[in-house]
Image (cartoon, grey):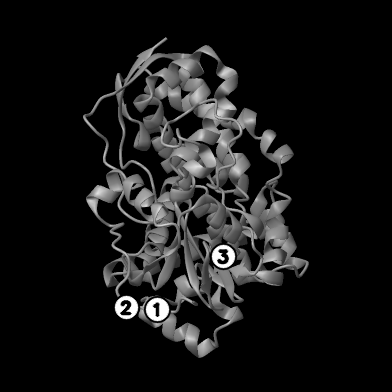
Amino acid sequence: MTATPKASEHGTAFEPLSATFAQNPYPAYAALRDKGEPQFFADFDMWLVTRFDDVAGIARDISMVRSPEFFMSEEEITEQKRLQNWLDMPHHQRFVQFSMLDSDGPVHDRLRKQVFREFTPAFIARQRTMIQSFVDRLVDSLIDKGEIDFVEDLAAQVPGHIIGRVLGVPDEDCPQLRVWSERVVQFFDIDRSDARKALAEQATTEFYHYLLKLMAERRAAPQEDLITRLIAAQDAGHLNEDELVSTCMLILMAGHGSTIDVLGSGMHALLRFPDQMARLRHDPALIHTAIQEMFRFESPLPFFHRYATADCVVGGKSFPRGTKFGLLYGAANRDPAAFGGDADVFDAGRNPNRHLAFGGGAHFCLGNHLARLDMEVIFTTLLTRLSSIALAEAEPQYKRGLSVRGPKALRLALTPA
């Protein structure tokens, strides 16, 4: 039987905006997984997919797309956006709702090609010295404070500055870019209030005017940075100005929030599993598998969607063309069928670890090498320079939402080595 419920029909009980879910979403994920097949979530008119094999299959299937343009008319898309409160925000629609992330087929391939060459493992490896120098100076300023908020004082200071330097943003501008990025991205979650909408549009507008100014400066005085090379790609006809602005916004936004979140949740995981922190201190070579485990254990982007462009079968149930699936990466990455009976345990040496935190298929995260290098440098530096790292609060509070996973703050007590 083909599943075709309407948005008004009763769906599965699922409360991703609740405080309980924010603190620990995994019981809710497990309850959905245990049902064995996708569950309808009326609030988003979508089917939630939680099992590893099902999520991986959809993420890697080229017939599963991010944009509804393959099966909806322009009028239908406009009506869908109206229902989801995505209209009447011209800059957000122009530069955020359209992007490499939310395009498919030839448009996506053309835009991704312009960025892919800049994020190769070899290019990222050449950034190590710069990242290490930046982290060393930051740790120098914090190590004797005794107590810090790891999220704000350290995690939030690194990823944006590093991706900013790669793109060509001056260090002094990076804190403002973080503010804009967070205000833009918050509107992707399921709370689409008018107040959040206005905040997203204002931030996008200010972000746009900043990038126009930066682009003009690079045209007048080209430098060895990504924005200069993207301008050259525009001049060569590989992308237009709107696509250039959208791509720069996407790179900067992707380089901020998710890496900050996984740094915070990764540190929290080490504190929750002190035997694994001790293991990592004893064997620093485990840093690579430990970082992969941080992404699996607390996936910083636990939700993305896909649309089916053809009739399909997922989890043993038939679905028609046009079905919207909610891929719960956070649930899939704790699936015992894929990770064994210890899926809810943090294992710094877990290998193999075929997690889905970076997505899959055509939309596999381009920035994964840079994010992992940032984390490798940060955690290695801290474990080398500190003899003790301890939680200095009862229990950190996690952000609310379906699309984010990370602590709001993380108070740490530090003891220098």
| Image position of 113 (left or right of 19) | right
Query: Can I make out residue 381 in this image?
Result: yes
Q: Is residue 220 above or below residue 66?
A: above
Q: Is residue 73 above or below residue 348?
A: below
As drawn, the residue found furthest toward the left would be 394
| Image position of 391 (left or right of 261) | left
Residue 92 has which mark? none
Task: Tell me what residue is drawn at x 71 percent, y 44 percent.
Answer: 120
Task: Tell me what residue is drawn at x 35 percent, y 27 percent.
Answer: 272
Query: Can I make out residue 171 in this image?
Result: no
* Residue at the disc numbered 3: 246
Observer-nearest of 175 and 381: 381
Disc 3 from disc 2: Cα separation: 36 Å
Q: Give how far across and how far down residue 60 sits, in percent.
A: 63, 58
Three-letter amino acid code of the residue under disc 2: Glu
Label 2: element kind: loop
Residue 9 has which mark? 2
| Image position of 238 (left or right of 297) | right
Three-letter amino acid code of the residue under disc 1: Pro
Question: Does the residue at mark 2 contact the one at mark 1 (Cβ under 8 Å)?
Answer: yes
First in sequence, mark 3 or 2: give its number.
2
Disc 1 from disc 3: Cα separation: 35 Å
Disc 2 from disc 1: Cα separation: 6 Å
Observer-nearest of 88 and 233: 88
Q: Give how far across and how far down residue 55 sits, in percent.
A: 53, 56
First in sequence, mark 1 or 3: give its number.
1
As drawn, the residue found furthest toward the top would be 417
User: Quadrant of the image for the C terminus?
Assistant: top left
Q: Is residue 397 above or below residue 131?
A: below
Three-letter amino acid code of the residue under disc 3: Ser
